[in-house]
Amino acid sequence: MIMKRALSVLFLGFVAVTGCGGDDGGGSSDFVGAWMYTGGTDTILCPGRPAVTSPVSGNFSINKGIDADLVLVDGTCNTKMDVKGSVASVRTGQTCTQTDQNGSAMLSFTGGTFTLNGLNGNISYSANLTIMQGGQSTTCQYTETATATKVSK
């Protein structure tokens, strides 16, 4: 059985935003900096199991990208994003794998956005989550809805 605590360790502070890419129009610099979660939840729904919902917390950073407008950096994950106006979107299909002593989990981003409103942001995204533990693999749905505040440039 996959324990809520193991999933919390795998995804502590992990955030990504997803959707379609686009022309940044010069607005990407407004996203660049260090961010802190101010609220929200992530939910993991696996077949035949009750949903596990946890509060999000921690920090992440957004940097200028080389072959994308931006790169969201959180732990070991680097997620490419493109900007249109006040919305940053991750290129769908990107994956990120995180591992701990209980196993590993891979996110494959399917949709969502990070919407900028001054020094605040609204995050909403979804991903397929493949959990590998004890030689078994389970594919679940992962969603996050959160708010964040920019804490430095």
Image: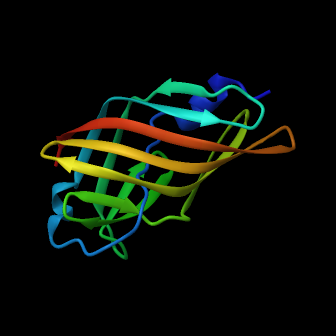
In the rendered image, the vertical position of residue 49 relative to residue 16, given as above or below: above
> Position of 85 compared to 130: left or right?
left
37 or 66: which is nearer to us?
37
The percent position of residue 34, horizontal first and vertical second, equals: 25, 44
Residue sticking out furthest to the right: 135
| Number of marks in picture | 0
The percent position of residue 71, horizontal first and vertical second, equals: 36, 61
Q: Quadrant of residue 21?
A: bottom left
The percent position of residue 61, horizontal first and vertical second, equals: 32, 48
Q: Residue visible at 15% across and 42% down?
A: 119
Q: Residue visible at 60% across and 35% down?
A: 44
> Position of 63 compared to 55: left or right?
left
- Colour scheme in use: rainbow
Where's the N terminus, which quadrant?
Answer: top right
Residue sticking out furthest to the left: 118
In the rendered image, the vertical position of residue 56 relative to residue 114, given as above or below: above
Q: Quadrant of residue 63?
A: bottom left
In the rendered image, the vertical position of residue 83 relative to residue 3, given as above or below: below
> Position of 83 compared to 1: left or right?
left
> Position of 26 compared to 131: left or right?
left
The percent position of residue 40, horizontal first and vertical second, equals: 38, 30
In the rendered image, the vertical position of residue 117 relative to residue 27, given as above or below: above
Q: Residue visible at 16% across and 64% down?
A: 27
